[in-house]
Image (spheres, coloured by chain):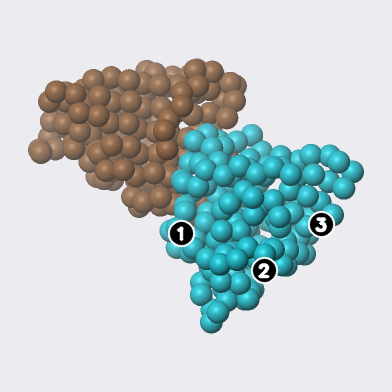
Chain colours: A cyan, B brown
Amino acid sequence: MTYKPDPKLDLVLERIVDVPRKLVWAAWTQPEHVKKWFTPAPWKTVGCEIDLRPGGIFSTLMRSPEGQDFPNVGCYLEVVEQERLVWTDALLPGYRPSKEPFMTAMLLLDTQGNGTKYTAIAMHRDEASRKKHEDMGFHQGWGKALDQLVAHAGSMGS
Amino acid sequence: MTYKPDPKLDLVLERIVDVPRKLVWAAWTQPEHVKKWFTPAPWKTVGCEIDLRPGGIFSTLMRSPEGQDFPNVGCYLEVVEQERLVWTDALLPGYRPSKEPFMTAMLLLDTQGNGTKYTAIAMHRDEASRKKHEDMGFHQGWGKALDQLVAHAGSMGS
């Protein structure tokens, strides 16, 4: 599905990173990698479950510096190897509507020289949800997580 | 994605119909056919838009006997020709979370002799939503619509 941006409802992080597309994809789709970079420090990702197909689970368990756990459970919608990953928390795995829908997220990857053009998009149902996400620190948080992904990629091999 | 039934949260209509699978599929996926059977009379389906792919629109416009219009806009999740159709109103076309999520629906078709085993499932986020849908007349409504589909199929040719 082609992405149609809506500046009133979406938040976008776009950056060129010096990591091959293949490794960015692996970092996003394998739990052992996700746990290494997904949550901005000093928060940690202490759990991750992935069933990489439409309808499959994408869940993470984040732990605050005070030791409180925050589970996130979502459902993949599109999985196009090394190119596009779409998931939402508006649906649980198996597509059942969730009780607390907040966003659909889309990761788009494209080769750029030896690196990757990285586009992460968060889509919201209304302007209030977008603003809430922005105020929660979307740009700083997703940016810092991406820095951690890049740092982790150095240890992933190719 | 394999369907895992949950009797507390799902409503199911299962029936064998004397209509070839190919025609049932066409009746569900072509707007000119949908308008002929989708809404139990004396209600009418006066509009229908379909973009038959994951992320694509599935919308209908229902008109009450008093002339009031009720739009429904949903998004396809899975499209497996003549076999499985999954859509939800928890997402708008393009996967954006919707403002009033209610259900994900799944249509499963299987050949049964010269006819079709027809399974329609409505999945809800909680027991209250399931009950509301049941009280709205799920079984009678979807059953009557299916009767209309069967009647319409007689004029569709093969």
Give left or right: position of B32 versus A31. left
Whichever of callouts 1 and 2 sits on the residue coming sooner in the sequence is 1
Badge 1 amino acid: Glu
Q: Nearer the viewer, residue B67 or B39?
A: B39
Identified at 50% across, 47% down, the residue is A52
User: Which chain letter goes with mark 1?
Assistant: A
Q: Nearer the viewer, residue A83 or A130?
A: A83
Whichever of callouts 3 and 2 sits on the residue coming sooner in the sequence is 3
Badge 3 amino acid: Ala
- Callout 3: helix, strand or loop? loop
- Residue contact at pointers 1 and 2, CB within 8 angstroms: no
Q: Return the residue at label 3.
A: A41
Q: Position of residue A147 (x, y in %)?
A: 73, 67
Which of the two discs, 1 and 2, sits closer to the camera? 2
Which of the two discs, 3 and 2, sits closer to the camera? 2
Is the residue B66 above or below the residue A12 in the image?
above
Q: Position of residue A158 (x, y in %)?
A: 56, 67
Whether discs 3 and 2 lie on one chain: the answer is: yes
Residue B73 circle label: none
Q: Return the residue at label 2.
A: A154
Q: Return the residue at label 1.
A: A81
